[in-house]
Amino acid sequence: MNFELTEEHKMIRDAARDFAQTELLPGVIERDETQTFPSSQIKKLGNLGLLGMMVNPRYGGAGMDTISYVLAMEEISKVDASCAVVMSVNNSLVCWGLETFGTEEQKEKYLKPLASGEIIGAFCLSEPEAGSDATSQKTTAFDKGDHYLLNGTKNWITNGSSASVYIVIAQTDVQKGHKGINAFIIEKGMEGFVVGEKENKLGIRGSDTHSIMFTDVKVPKENRIGEDGFGFTFAMKTLSGGRIGIAAQALGIASGAYELALQYSKERKAFGKEISKHQAIAFKLADMATEIDAARLLCLKAAWLKDNGQNYDKAGAMAKVFASETAMKTTTEAVQVHGGYGFVKEYHVERLMRDAKITQIYEGTSEIQRIVISRSVLK
Ligand code: CAA
């Protein structure tokens, strides 16, 4: 067993770290406050190859492995978790599914611009009444011969208005339950496609989250992904990889807050010495460092399994539940270490604390991860 990163991995991590410091840090507080989507920053992420990291260069991607993806996600998330979720959704939920299950035509037409960052994508599974219970799809797409007719509403869609291409999960045969579900590629601008109001969120406020409504949208037959009835399996397989990305986002939020707390604790003095020299603070730092290390190892293990063709469903769920709970705990403690300064925006940790919360909710809540893990260990 070797815990050393390769030179290439270190280069990718350092490039992502430099990018985060020079391009994302300036303006991150304002973007959070005004809920401004980081358009120019996302363009630059695309130019760096970070929006289609694992896609074969033949389809416009960077051809890197999942370990590189975890390392880059951590660095981007340390500074701007909003940019990181855009990156995660495009890489894991959009590009991966298209590359793995799409037809050659779908890859040429959609994957190439998505992987190169020319456009970004969105993944539409959740509905007003189908979040954790993902098999209860109310959105329908009925076969009308040469096309499907899509109707319904999707909720909480990351990149809701900024995406150009949407992967939409819909029920095509109500009688067949989850075996009667399909996934479709929808283009923004198709007749009957409407983007709803932007959500006003607690965290990751730079990313844009919307409902999407479909009314009699005609979806060409060739836009279905995979065999008829493959949609639910497609969604589950796609989310398994997505969870590694969100685990890495949570890891980055935690390590970003920890680094700020560590630095502050060495500068701030109380009772005649740096607060880091008080055991009450030093022990907090010790716990943060330990849990972050454990979360990183879980993320890298899940990534390694994926890169080596092994099953990563359980490992990804473990990484996500542990990293997201570590993010919530660490960011809350980082605010505590900062005292009153932690409660104001200039010190960044309050934003990281707000950003952390969503990592326990999206791409499967912590409770759903525990279902996935427990089913696997009890099998
Ligand atoms: N890979 C392949 N197939 C899978 C699978 C996986 N990882 N997980 C489940 N399946 C298959 C099962 O084998 C089963 O198929 P068969 O009947 O043919 O055997 C089918 O899917 C149904 O599975 P279950 O019986 O386990 O279904 P369930 O109703 O008990 O629920 C669940 C399964 C794991 C709870 C699932 O509903 C789930 O993951 N829910 C959470 C949904 C979620 O993560 N939503 C996030 C939205 S996307 C998002 O947040 C993106 C964003 O914007 C950031």
Image (tube, rainbow, N blue to C red):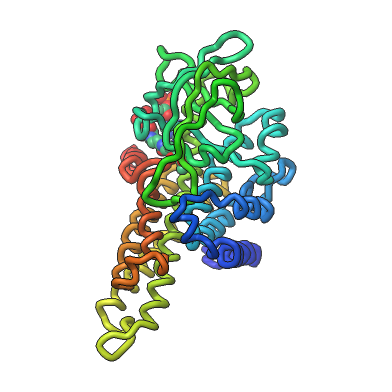
Q: In this view, does 112 lie above or below 330?
A: above
Q: Which of 378 and 232 is in front in this view?
A: 232
For ligand 1, give the image quadrant: top left
| Image location of residue 254, percent across then percent down | 40, 62
Q: Which of 176 and 355 is in front in this view?
A: 355
| Image location of residue 59, percent across then percent down | 71, 41
Q: In which quarter of the image is the C terminus?
A: top left
Q: Is residue 373 above or below residue 356?
A: above
| Image location of residue 164, percent across then percent down | 61, 35
Q: In this view, does 36 lie to the left or right of 127?
A: right
Rendered residue at 66%/37% (across/down): 111
In the rendered image, is residue 64 in sight?
no
Rendered residue at 42%/71% (across/down): 260
Q: Furthest residue to the front?
A: 34
Q: In this view, does 272 lie to the left or right of 17?
A: left
Q: Furthest residue to the top?
A: 145
Q: In this view, does 244 lie to the left or right of 188?
A: left
Q: Furthest residue to the bottom?
A: 272
In the rendered image, is residue 68 in sight?
yes
Rendered residue at 56%/61% (across/down): 24
| Image location of residue 109, percent across then percent down | 70, 32
Q: How many numbered circles are shown?
A: 0
Image quadrant of residue 56? top right
Q: Is residue 222 above or below residue 341?
A: above
